[in-house]
Image (cartoon, grey):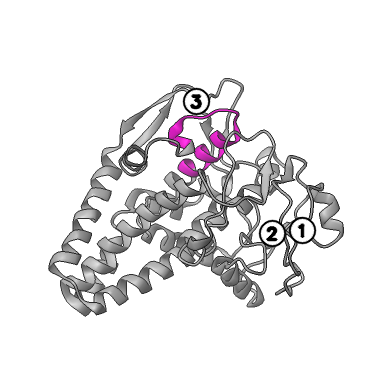
Amino acid sequence: MTQADRQDHDPYAVHHLRPGPQANAELGVVVWDPVHSLWNGAMLLGAVAAVVLAFSWSGVAVFLGLTGATLLVGHSVGFHRRLIHGSFEAPLWLDHLLMWVGTLVGMSGPLWMIRAHDVRDWGQRQNRCHSYLSNQAGVWRDYWWNLHCRLELARPPIFAPLPRVADDRFYRFLERTWMLQQLPVALLLFWLGGASWLLWGVCVRVCVSVTGHWWIGRLAHRQGPQTWLVDGSGVQAHDVPWAAVPTMGEAWHNNHHAYPGSARIGLYADQSDWGFVLIRILERGGLVWNVRTPDNLPPRPALRAARRPTPAPPAAPRRSSTQTPPAAPAAPAARRRSGRR
C-alpha cells in the first residue's frame, strides 16, 4: 500500500495536503478573490431581484425543492462525505453524479472545495491558526472574507489531491466549468416557469446555499453544545442543533470533528442526519459499500469527552450502531467495547 493509499484509508487524516515542517497556519494575508466575489455578488443581486420583481409561490417551492436536493445529494453526501472524507465507496457513475450535483450547489468546483476544506481543517488542528480559518473575525469581516476573498498563507501546505481525485478527468472538467453547470438548469427552469423559476431556482438557491454554508460554519466554530474534545486542536467544534435538518446532518459539527471519516454525523437517536439516511438507502440497494461509522473506525487516542452529561433515560436505538453520549470521559476504545462511542 502506497503512502497515498494509507492516507486515504486513515479516517482521521487531512487527506489532500502535505503540510511539511515549515507550513504555518497563522501567517498569511486575506486577498480579494475576483472569481468567487463576482459570482457570489451576482447571485445575491439575482436573489434580490427574485424577491422584489419575480416573487411567486411556485418559485419558492422550486427554490426549496432544488436547494434541499442539491444540499443533500451533492454537498453533504457527495462533496463532503464522499469526495473530501472518503467515508464510503461508490461506482464511478454514481460518484460522478454526486459530484455533478455537488457542483450545482454553486460554491465552486470539486478541487477548489477540497482545498478550501482541507486547509481549514488542517489549520484548525494546529495550536494557532489565522482568524480566516477559525471564523473568529467580526461577523461582517468574516462574511466578506469567506464569500469574496481567499487566504494566502506565507508558508502554506502543499495541495496534493489523492490519485482517486487528481486522476479523474470528470472532476477536472467540473473544476473548469463549475459556473457553466448552472446553465442547463437555468434554461430548463426558464422554459418551465419563466423568470421567476429561473431566479428562485438558481440565484436564490445558490445565494442561500453559499451564505448558509458560511454562517453555519461560523457558528459551529464559535458556540454551541459539545460532546467531544480533540486534544491538540486549537479550534474545537460545536453542534448547531437547530440547523440539523436544513444542513442534512452537517450541523452536528462537534461529532464530525471527533470522527471526520464517519459517513454518519448525527450519532445519537435524537440527532437528525438525512445525509446518512440516504447513504444507508444506497447501501441497502447495493450502490455504495464500505460505509464507515464510529462503530467500525479504529480508536482515536486524542479524543475525549467534553463533559459529563446530565443523566437521562436511554433512548431506544434506531440501529445497532446508534450511539448515546458518553457517561464519563472514557477512552474511545472502552466505549467501543460496550457498543457505545
Alpha-carbon neighbours of circle 2 within 10 Å: few (<14), some, or many (≥20)? some
Above/below status of 271 relative to 108: below
Q: CA distance from mark 1 to mark 2?
A: 6 Å
Percent x, y of residue 209: 37, 58
Which residue matches tag 1? 296
Percent x, y of residue 292: 69, 59
Nearer the observer: mark 2 or 3; the answer is 3
Report the amino acid beneath label 2: Arg
Marks 1 & 2, CB-CB < 8 Å contact:
yes
What residue is shown at x 63% (from left), y 77% (from top)?
285
Q: Check the picture and name the quadrant holding the C terminus.
A: bottom right
Q: Is residue 341 left or right of residue 118?
A: right
Report the amino acid beneath label 1: Asn
Percent x, y of residue 73: 48, 66
* Res 50 visible: yes
Q: Is residue 229 left or right of residue 295?
A: left
Q: Check the picture and name the quadrant holding the N terminus.
A: top right
Which residue matches tag 3? 26
Marks 3 & 1, CB-CB < 8 Å contact:
no
Dot label at residue 68: none
Which quadrant would residue 290 be assigned to in this image?
bottom right
Which quadrant would residue 46 be assigned to in this image?
bottom left
**Residue interval drawn in magenta:** 115-133
Above/below status of 27 relative to 234: above
What residue is shown at x 37% (from left), y 37% (from top)?
138
Which residue matches tag 2? 292
The reply to whether the magenta stretch includes residue 67 is no
Percent x, y of residue 282: 60, 73
* Res 96 visible: no
Nearer the observer: mark 3 or 1; the answer is 3
Q: Earlier in the sequence, mark 2 or mark 3?
A: 3
